[in-house]
Image (cartoon, grey):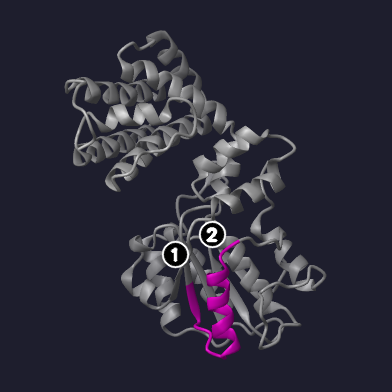
Amino acid sequence: MTALPPRQHTAFVGHRDAEQAFLQAWNQGRVHHAWLFSGMRGIGKATLAMRIARFVLSDRVLVGATTLAVSEDDPVCSRIAQDTHGDFRVLERTWDEKRKRLKGDIPVDDIRALSEWLSMTSSRGGWRVVLVDTADDMNRNSANALLKILEEPPQRTLFLMLSHCPGRLLPTLRSRCQHVPMRPLSEAQCQDLMERYAASSLDVEARRILVQLGEGSIGQALDLASQGGVEHYQALMGILRGVLEGSPNLPALYTFADTISRTEDVFRLATDLILWWLGRAIRYAGRKMECPGIVQDDASLARIVLAAAPLDQLIEVWEKIRALFERAEAVHLDRKQVFISAVLSLQALVRSVPQTAGSVR
């Protein structure tokens, strides 16, 4: 229940401004050698980058084009999809065979291998394209090594860098790039994509909930769909209702915590959802806006928490819960107890002030 990987499909929704920014530079013959596309995870940054790569590497591309679209029968599409194009490279986290999981970062050795590849002649005598997916995954050594390449870039080489958090990148690295921020997709665009990819397996209400949970990220919405995100979110709100309203069903809490703690993916899903729910409530309160509901109880529960403390204290609680979940993963703490502790910390926050506290401060 997921969209095809960006390598393998040419469909593109939204982000007209980002597409036109590149096209304008291309048509004017002033293409910057490095582009940084930033925005939240799952909104289409990699899809746009693949679209640019196919456009630039296509044998049929002409100056004056009004779109980056390349015909699906162009050989460049199959070569990129099959990772057989000699002038296209992707830098990304690779599989750690020993630990049976993705490596934690993009190591400097991968940048050195890229530098060696760039020292050779283009296989087709034209452009070469390097996609960094994502720049956030580089450690300091690899970032500095890439920076050296960008300072003296090879001719006719285009670097496309993606970032979910551009503020965390080296300032010198950002300064070498043409930065194009990308906004979340609209709700209507996400609805259209959900119907395209999940209409056969999800009803209308489930798709609505997933679009709301995705907040403009179709990637996140589809990931949640594949993991049973709707059911988990509804169950989580049921657990929080009792805890925050003063009548906790402790056996249900312990059973829920035990269930989600059995596998790493389910535990991460549940912890992401509780952090997302609390963070969303804080964001709306910071804008002095009412937090809209997605499922039964989530908005009313948010109001209970928001009435219990000022925003700075709520942010501190959110950060402590996030740090607790990160430690659980890093040093293998008991997942069940970690989740219970996080939920009970919210209960303690609510109980620390009279429930007549009134409006959000």
**For residue 307, what is the image quadrant?**
top left
Mark 2: secondary structure = loop
Mark 1: secondary structure = helix
Residue at left offset 32%, top offset 26%:
342
**Viewer-nearest residue: 151 or 142:** 151
Q: Residue furthest right?
A: 73
Q: Dot 1 surroundings within 10 Å: few (below 14), some, or many (20 or more)? A: some
Q: Residue furthest bottom?
A: 29
**Viewer-nearest residue: 97 or 10:** 10
Which amino acid, by three-letter code, is at mark 2?
Glu
Which amino acid, by three-letter code, is at mark 1?
Val
From mark 2 to mark 1, how far is it between C-alphas?
A: 12 Å
Q: Which mark is residue 205?
A: none
Residue 142 in view (yes/no): yes
Residue at left offset 59%, top offset 31%:
228
Residue at left offset 37%, top offset 10%:
250
Q: Position of residue 64 (x, y in %)?
A: 66, 87
Residue extent of the magenta highlight: 14-35
Residue that carries the numbered disc 2 in the rendered image: 92
Tell me if residue 20 is in the magenta stretch. Answer: yes
Residue that carries the numbered disc 1 in the rendered image: 108
